[in-house]
Amino acid sequence: MFICLGGIVPYNNIQVESIINIQELCVMTFGVPGDRTYKLVLIGDGAVGKTSIRERYLGRGFKRSQLATIGVDFAQKYTSYGGVNVRHIIWDLAGQPSYASVRRHYYQGSSAILLVYSVVERESFDNATKWLVEAHKHLRGADWSGWQGLPTAVIGNKIDLRDSGEFEDVVETLEGHAFAEYFAERLDAPVLYKETSALTGENINDTFSELTGLMFEADGKRPPRTVKSANEE
Ligand SMILES: Nc1nc2c(ncn2[C@@H]2O[C@H](COP(=O)(O)OP(=O)(O)OP(=O)(O)O)[C@@H](O)[C@H]2O)c(=O)[nH]1
Ligand SMILES: [Mg+2]
């Protein structure tokens, strides 16, 4: 084995003759240099499953008795996308109306939004518009020289309950798709629609992965940040 920037490569386990140089070997083992850090903000009504989605994504399983978030909570996960190391910093905002004044400070600097509603609580779907409007209103105040809608994942959660027969007036897939398409156009933002279950884990990793793809694309399009001097504030 030999020392590579960031760790030790056990070269006995790989086809040494196919390696062009040590740099390539390092890249294969540890990913390309230049990690990307993204701030992701989870929003949506209380009890739709935001924290449960976050916990499932972090590999911490599912709790039926997940406690309501107080204010804001943070978590981070290292992952990779297309061979690039990626760090997701996840801001999990409490959905209860009483936290509205706290929330507005937390949107700034976001790389992407995850808007969650529950497919078995139509009111949370009806409130989805309000959430996206709130987020974008505060985000426009961020220091971008030109506004571009942020990559957004619209997530219909709790799909494991939709066919249980216990709930009336469930939100169907087509309605979620139509909502996502409408907002993509209205906000001029890349929006993806996913249906998930934090209980079974269905589509949780795929959602974060596809959203990361949208953030990579947005990185290429975004104008550089303009830094305001103190006397401009
Ligand atoms: N069956 C089922 N229950 C879920 C799912 N996701 C979350 N829950 C349950 O729904 C309840 C609320 O979940 P949370 O993750 O706390 O919801 P939240 O959106 O973070 O709520 P706030 O922190 O109050 O904004 C908990 O009892 C969870 O166990 C799911 O996909 N399926
Ligand atoms: Mg929560």
Image: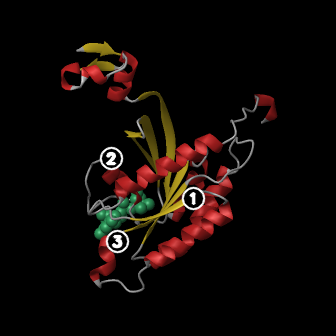
The amino acid type found where label 1 is placed reads: Ala
Q: CA distance from mark 2 to mark 1?
A: 26 Å
Q: Is residue 70 visible?
A: no
The circle on residue 58 is 2
Mark 1 falls on what kind of element?
helix
Q: Earlier in the sequence, mark 2 or mark 1?
A: 2
Residue under label 1: 100
Cβ at disc 2 under 8 Å from ligand 1: no
Q: Nearer the viewer, residue 117 or 33?
A: 33
**Residue 114 located left or right of residue 62:** right
**Residue 98 located left or right of residue 77:** right
Residue under label 3: 159
Would you say the residues marked 3 and 1 are in contact, meaning their CB atoms lie under 8 Å apart?
no
Q: Is residue 9 visible?
A: yes
Q: How many marks?
A: 3
Q: Quadrant of the C terminus?
A: top right
